[in-house]
Image: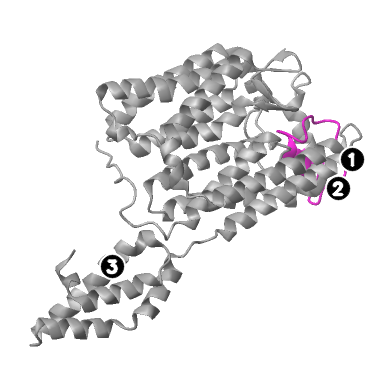
Amino acid sequence: MRQMEEYQIVRQFLDRVCKQVRTRQMHIEIREELLSHIEDRVEFLMREGNTEESAVEDAVKQMGVPEDIGKSLHMAHRPQMDWKLLVMLGLLLIIGLVGMLSVYYGDERYSIVLAERKLLYLGIGVLCMTVFYFLDYRQLRKYSAPVFFFVVLLLAFSLLYGQLYDMRTPYINIGFIGVNIITFSLLPLLIALAGMKPASQWGRWETVLNILYRGVLPVVLYSISSSIIYTYIYTVGFLVLTWRTSRSRKQFALISVMPLAGLSIFLFTRMDHLLLRWREFVNPSAKELWYMGNNAETIQAAGWFGQGFGEVTPKIPYVLYENVFPYLIYCFGWMFGIATGVLILLFLMRIWNISAVHQDIYAKHISSLLIVVFGFRLLWPMLMGLGVFPKVTLEPPFISYSGMNQIMDLAAVGLLLSIYRRKNMIPSEAGDAPSVKAA
């Protein structure tokens, strides 16, 4: 207890202030700040010739009505809802629903079951988002290591025993639903990684083990699945987190060598596939490389205001999945495509803003990794549809059909909302001290 708190009048004042503030985590910081103000006033009054006791009484009176101060502090530290992020998410979900209904009404090959399942996944996803919003995200940190281990184990199991329709695939059947573990695993794996022991605290042998366990093993598993883009996303996420938590550039470089080597070896083994994608990218008009060429023709035919709702072009496949952007532009025009692109950029900027304004290091790590995941999964399909990036199999979240992945994506947004909700409820000393990069 600081010396000033020995005075009963000071303790009563602080208690009456804190009684109005429901966020108990902030009480210690509030008391420290108010005590500093009282001490400064007492020191000033004593220099004017007052005794210490009378100076304390006058200083407390000059602070004002404690209930009013407490109510103001409560308003400053109350839970916050990120309405901007929520509105942008709602617009993206509406775009996805409108696009899916347009496909359903325009192409008899698609059944109403897709719409029913989309709404079912959306409902479950919104429920998960709500649960994560009210959940204190900091409680997840203690489960990070078990979750990471379980997801890695699940990945390995799916690669060994996964199947769908009697075919060997990385799917695991949950009732009547087949879950692609490769796409389903990425978010929980990276979020768990954010809560594990930071690189700045690793010892020598611990560094070796963590490089192999956290950096190399997931890269190998994703490589075995032949998913180039998911291997790449995980590697980038791992490197971003390593950069944020390493003691120095030298440690970062040391940790990065083996995961990057694993990624390079995998890409080398897929050289024929990569060369095919590159030829298709640089020469989309070739007859044998029809995929990107047809996307370009479809977008060119859209015009500023599109061909209208329910128009389905037979030239492009997978209009509910990775080619949803060219299809939406074809139906609703270039203006709609530009607006959707701006909305996506604003959505990613909002996540960045959450990371920037938060004081908790754990929250910053989660937000940074979600920027990586959502950035790749939203921007790459959009730019791929425009012919700027090469073709990969990657469904954009919220806008595509998504299936089970939609549940994970909405749960991740709920986690972001939980982080934002507590941005004013966490003391400034919370979290680890940020590491300093040394040359």
What secondary structure is found at the residue carrying circle 2?
loop
Left/right of residue 221 with respect to residue 243 in the rendered view: right
- Do callouts 3 and 1 mark residues in contact (Cβ within 8 Å)? no
Q: Residue beneath label 2, please?
A: 309
Query: Which quarter of the figure is the C terminus placed in?
Result: top left
The three-letter amino acid code for the residue at tag 1 is: Gly
Q: Residue beneath label 3, please?
A: 31
Q: Earlier in the sequence, mark 3 or mark 1?
A: 3
Q: Earlier in the sequence, mark 2 or mark 3?
A: 3
The three-letter amino acid code for the residue at tag 3 is: Arg
Total number of numbered discs in the rendering: 3
Q: Residue at x 9, y 85 (%)?
A: 51
Q: Closer to the camera: disc 2 or disc 3? A: 3
Is 313 inside the magenta-drawn segment?
Answer: yes
Q: Earlier in the sequence, mark 1 or mark 2?
A: 1
Q: Residue at x 38, y 56 (%)?
A: 426
Q: Which residues are magenta?
A: 299-328
- Do callouts 1 and 2 mark residues in contact (Cβ within 8 Å)? yes
Residue 59 position (above or below residue 245):
below
Q: Residue at x 55, y 58 (%)?
A: 82
